[in-house]
Every structure is written in structure tokens, then in C-alpha cells.
């Protein structure tokens, strides 16, 4: 119970930390709304030429765009969460202090990132989505249970997103400079999550591959749950499997790093 309260306090601290950046949050809301308008214009032109592309009608395509803008910062689809800070602590050797704390390093960062994610969803994600609902026809459900199923999927997506970024951050134990790893995270986040186009639009073998990668659990699958295109339980199973696999991999890499790697600067 004591550990649970501790990590809950860490999550709350993560929420409060990002809540202090009000100007940045307002700028993020504006940016997501503008990019949403640009993407919607592109999608509408594309779906005019290719109706039912990827199995979506036009309203579903528009809904997908605004969900992407709502979840962009929430799930740190192109980075921008804790990973830069952890890599810097590894580079300077400050991570040694973290390892001496009577807490689990992975769970500590997970709790803080969940707090960040919840704030970004409420502070930066809700307004662009509501704007989209007011301006465009969208395929949003009226059943509260569907919304609940969607929110469960989003929470699981938060965990998968953290697990991916934690592995990237741990590469700092071996790299002198983590810039390249963070840039790779940005590229894969844009392409493999479906931020550019829904993954169900990708053709042939490429589509089959990207839809089984962990990035599919971040945007595509929660969107399909909300729009009634996917079974929630099948989606949860996919997300839980990837969360367990990636968190376990992170645990193993963390163990190898702390046993064998001399902390840079420490």
C-alpha cells in the first residue's frame, strides 16, 4: 500500500508539473487544431477520390484525424515525454542517484509519464477534438459504454507508449549522444502509429506488418474501438501482450545496463 501511494504521488506530480506550463499548453491546443484542419482538408480530398478507403467512410476518416490530434501529445507519438530527461540523466551520471532510491526505476518513470499523459489528454487533447465535432460531421458513438471501452484502450496505449520510449531512453547507457535514437523515435512515431494515414490504408505486406507492430496499439486500435471497427477485447489483448513484452524487455535491458555499463560522467 505504501508503494502504491508513492507511485500515485509520482503520477500526481507528473500531472502538476505539466499543468504549470499553461502557455505551452495553449500553444499546443492551437497547433493541434491548425494541423487538424490541414489534415482534414487533405483527407476530405483523398476520400472524395477514394470513398471507403481503408474501410472508413468520410466521417470516420475525419474522426480519425481529430483523434490523432487529441492523442498526439497524450501518447507522445513522436516523443516529447520523459525520454529526453532520462537520457540526459544517464549521460551526466545523475541516474546513479535514481538507482540508489528505494523505488523501482521503471515504475517510477512509468508513474510520472502516466501523470503527464493524463494531463495532456485533458489539457491539450479534448479541445481540438471538441472543435472537430463542432465543425465537421464525425463518427462519434452515443453509447457511453463505447466511450468507456475507448478510454480503457487509451490507458493501455499510454503504457505501450511508455514501454517503447523507455527502451529508447535506455539506449543512452551505450550511446554517447541519444539524438539519433530520439530522431528515429520521431520517424517511427509518425509512420508506424498511423499519424500520416490510418494503418488500414497501407497496402499488401506493408500493411500487414505495421498492423502487428506495437505502434498500432497507440492510435489505430483505440480509434477503431471508438468507431466500432474493432472488438474491444481483442484490442485489449493486443495492447496487453505488447505492454508485457516491451516492459519485460525494458526490465532486461535495464538490468544489463546497470550491471555492465559504467555510467557516462559518473
Image (cartoon, helix red, strand yellow):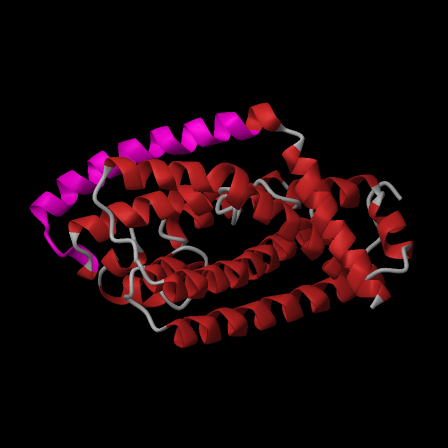
Q: Quadrant of the C terminus?
A: top right
Task: Give how far across and how far down residue 33 sits, in percent.
Answer: 37, 32
Query: Quadrant location of residue 135?
Result: top left
Q: Start and end of the magenta stretch?
A: 25-54
Can residue 174 be seen here? The reply is no
Which residue occupies the foreground of this view, 159 or 143?
Answer: 143
Q: Residue at x 63, y 57 (%)?
A: 167
Q: Residue at x 82, y 44 (%)?
A: 264
Task: Give how far across and how far down residue 110 sits, in percent.
Answer: 68, 56
Magenta-drawn stretch contains 42:
yes
Q: Quadrant of the N terminus?
A: bottom right
Magenta-drawn stretch contains 188:
no
Name the main secondary structure of what is drawn in magenta: helix
Would residue 216 appear left or right of 240 to someone viewing this image?
left
Which residue occupies the foreground of this view, 153 or 262?
Answer: 153
Would residue 191 appear left or right of 263 to someone viewing this image?
left
Would residue 164 appear left or right of 71 to someone viewing this image?
right
Amino acid at each position: 500500500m505504501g508503494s502504491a501511494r508513492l507511485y500515485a504521488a509520482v503520477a500526481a506530480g507528473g500531472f502538476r508539473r505539466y499543468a504549470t506550463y499553461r502557455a505551452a499548453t495553449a500553444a499546443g491546443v492551437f497547433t493541434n487544431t491548425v494541423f487538424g484542419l490541414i489534415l482534414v482538408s487533405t483527407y476530405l480530398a483523398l476520400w472524395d477520390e477514394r470513398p471507403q478507403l481503408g474501410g472508413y467512410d468520410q466521417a470516420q476518416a475525419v474522426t480519425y484525424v481529430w483523434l490523432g490530434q487529441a492523442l498526439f501529445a497524450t501518447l507522445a507519438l513522436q516523443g516529447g515525454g520523459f525520454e529526453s530527461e532520462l537520457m540526459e540523466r544517464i549521460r551526466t551520471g545523475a541516474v546513479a542517484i535514481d538507482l540508489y532510491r528505494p523505488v523501482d526505476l521503471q515504475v517510477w518513470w512509468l508513474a510520472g509519464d502516466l501523470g503527464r499523459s493524463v494531463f495532456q489528454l485533458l489539457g491539450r487533447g479534448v479541445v481540438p477534438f471538441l472543435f472537430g465535432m463542432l465543425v465537421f460531421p464525425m463518427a462519434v458513438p452515443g453509447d457511453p459504454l463505447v466511450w468507456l471501452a475507448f478510454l480503457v484502450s487509451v490507458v493501455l496505449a499510454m503504457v505501450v507508449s511508455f514501454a517503447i520510449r523507455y527502451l529508447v531512453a535506455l539506449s543512452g547507457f551505450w550511446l554517447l549522444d541519444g539524438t539519433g535514437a530520439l530522431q528515429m523515435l520521431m520517424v517511427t512515431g509518425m509512420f508506424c502509429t498511423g499519424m500520416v494515414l490510418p494503418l488500414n490504408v497501407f497496402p499488401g505486406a506493408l500493411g500487414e506488418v505495421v498492423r502487428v507492430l506495437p505502434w498500432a496499439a497507440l492510435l489505430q486500435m483505440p480509434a477503431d474501438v471508438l468507431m466500432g471497427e474493432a472488438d474491444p477485447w481483442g484490442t485489449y489483448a493486443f495492447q496487453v501482450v505488447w505492454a508485457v513484452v516491451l516492459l519485460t524487455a525494458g526490465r532486461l535491458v535495464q538490468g544489463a545496463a546497470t550491471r555492465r555499463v559504467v555510467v557516462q560522467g559518473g
